[in-house]
Image: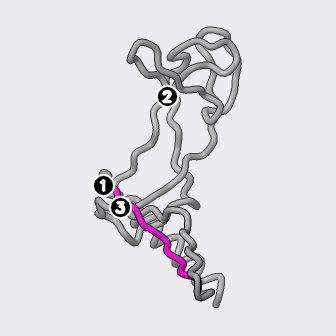
Amino acid sequence: MTIIPVDPQSIKENTNAGSTRSAYALPMEKTEHPDGSVTIHRPVQWFSHLPIPRFSYDYIPTTVICNNCSEAFLHTELVGDCCREVWSNEICPRCGEWDCCNIKFERPSDKTLEEVLKKRNKEAQNEVF
């Protein structure tokens, strides 16, 4: 099994963590009136979603090997597709084999992410002074 590690430099704390509603700004509507004045309105559409996590992060591009064709490529090249309501995010970009590799994404705890973020911020402060 290949573990896909978190990129420690990408960790950031979300300011709206826990929120379950977000707004999406729609295109501006412009109304010109007979007296020459203009009204500009930007409607907003609200939508619900799962709670925003406390931290966001990216993963380090990691080399994986297809179990079918033995080609090596980055995990970011894996293809996702659905067939008869079965989903796979591990389709080989070279030979098309489904579930071509066995990968697991690192899932650090909030406590671990907080410690890494504090350490990174402290190192950044030391560089300034």
Instruction: Say if mark 1 contacts mark 2, CB within 8 Å.
Output: no
Query: Disc 3 versus disc 1: distance between alpha carbons?
Result: 7 Å
Q: Mark 1 Cα within 10 Å, few/some/many (few <14, many 20+)?
A: few
Which label was assigned to residue 19? none
Specify which label sits upstream in the sequence, 1 or 2. Answer: 1
> Would you place residue 80 above or below residue 20 in this image?
above
The amino acid on which the numbered mark 1 sits, given as a three-letter code, is Ser
- Compare residues 64 and 85 and report the one nearer the observer: 85
| Front position in the image: 60 or 28 | 28
User: Measured from the top left, where is residue 98 in percent x and y?
Assistant: 53, 14
Q: How far across and how far down the image is residue 91, in percent?
A: 57, 20
Is the residue marked by circle 3 packed among few (<14), some (14-19), or many (20+) residues within 10 Å? Answer: few
Kindly report which numbered mark, 3 or 2, lies closer to the viewer in this rendering: 3
Q: What's the residue at 60%, 83% (across, down)? A: 126
Which numbered marker is on residue 46?
A: 3
Residue 100 in the magenta stretch? The answer is no
Asked which quadrant contains residue 129, the reply is bottom right
Is the C-beta separation of discs 3 and 1 under 8 Å?
A: yes
- The Cα–Cα distance between marks 1 and 2, rounded to whole angstroms, is 31 Å
Dot placed on the residue nearer the N-terminal end, 3 or 2:
3
Residue 48 badge: 1
Q: Which residue is mark 2?
A: 103
Residue 73 lies left or right of residue 23; in this view the side is: right
Label 1 secondary element: strand
Q: Residue at x 50, y 55 (%)?
A: 57
Helix or strand or loop: what does disc 2 sit on?
A: strand
Q: Amino acid at mark 2?
A: Ile
Lateral position of residue 38 relative to residue 103, left or right: right
